Amino acid sequence: MAYNFKSESEVKEYINNLGIEYRFGCYSEKKPEVCHLLADFLESIKKDYEKAGKVYRTNCDDYKYGKSCLKYGTYSLLGKGSKTSDYKLAYDYFEKGCHLEEPDSCLNQGLLLITKNDKPELKQDVIKGMQLLEKACQHQNGNACYYLSGMYIVGVKKDNLPGSLFQKDYNPEEYLVQKNMKRAFEFALKGCDMGNMYSCANLSQMYAKGDGVEKNEKLAEKYKTKAMEMQKDAQSNKTLTFQEGLNPT
C-alpha cells in the first residue's frame, strides 16, 4: 500500500502499522534485529523509554544482540527509562556488548574504566580500559583510536593527574602509561582513516612538528585540510537518526 505522507491520518496509520510489524517480527518470529527496531520505535516514535529499555535489555540477554546491549548500557548510564543511573549495570551491559563484538560497547566499557569516578562498585582500571579501547579501535571505531592517541600524547600519571606536555617536566617514574609519540601517531592515523576529524587534526600537528613521525609539511597541510573538510561536512549534515544504536557520549 502506498501512503500519502502529506495526509496526517495516513501518516498515523503508517506509524501504527510499523509498530504492529515490529511487534510481530519480535514476539512471534523472534528476530533479534526486529526486536531492536521495536525498541528504537518505542524510543523514537512513542517516547516510551521504560518499555524501550525493557525490550533492549531482553534482546541483549535472550538473543545476544550486541546493539541492544549497547543501548541498554547507555540507558543504565543515563538513568533513561528508570529513576536513577546505575554505572555498574551500564558497565555490565557494555561488557556483554563488547563480548558480542559491538565496538561502541568496548569503547564505552573502556571509558568507564579509564575515567576517574567516585563509584565504589566500579573500580578504575586504566590498563584494562586502554585494552578495551584498542579492541574497539581494531574493530573500526575511530573514536577509540582518537582517545588512545591522546593518552599516549600526554601519558597517564599514577596519581591520575594530567600529564605535562613539556618534555623538561617529564618524569617516567610518575607515569602508569608512558608518553609514546610513535604509538600516538599510529592510533591517530587509524582514527583519521576511519573518519575521526580530531585524529586528522592531531596528525597534522604531528607531521608539522615531527612528533612520532618524520616532519613533513605537505602531509601536515593535507591532514589539516582533511580535518577542516570533515568539520564542514559534520556541520552541514546533522540529521536525526533512527534504527541505530546510541552514539557514545
Image (cartoon, helix red, strand yellow):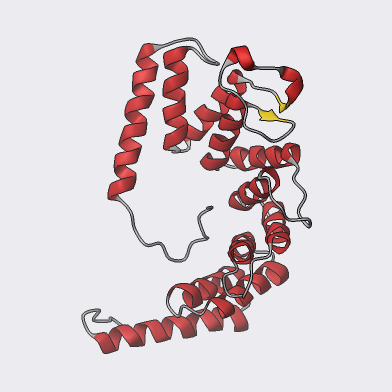
Residue located at (35% from left, 30% from top): 226
Q: In which quadrant of the rendered view does residue 242 lie?
A: bottom left
Name above or below for residue 30 compared with residue 215. Answer: below
Counting from the top left corner in percent of width and height, residue 157 is at 70, 29
Residue nearest the viewer, comparing 64 with 216: 216
Q: In which quadrant of the rendered view does residue 5 lie?
A: bottom left
Whether residue 50 is visible, yes or no, is yes
Counting from the top left corner in percent of width and height, residue 159 is at 73, 33
Counting from the top left corner in percent of width and height, residue 172 is at 72, 18
Q: Quadrant of the N terminus?
A: bottom left
Residue located at (62% from left, 43% from top): 136
Counting from the top left corner in percent of width and height, residue 249 is at 52, 53
Residue nearest the viewer, comparing 6 with 2: 6
Residue nearest the viewer, comparing 120 with 27: 120
Is residue 178 found left or right of 227 in the rendered image?
right
Residue nearest the viewer, comparing 30 with 124: 124
Residue located at (39% from left, 17% from top): 219
Whether residue 31 is visible, yes or no, is no
Name above or below for residue 112 compared with residue 149. Answer: below
Total numbered labels placed on residues in the image: 0
Is residue 238 found left or right of 123 in the rendered image?
left
Q: Residue furthest left?
A: 6
Residue located at (77% from left, 49% from top): 123
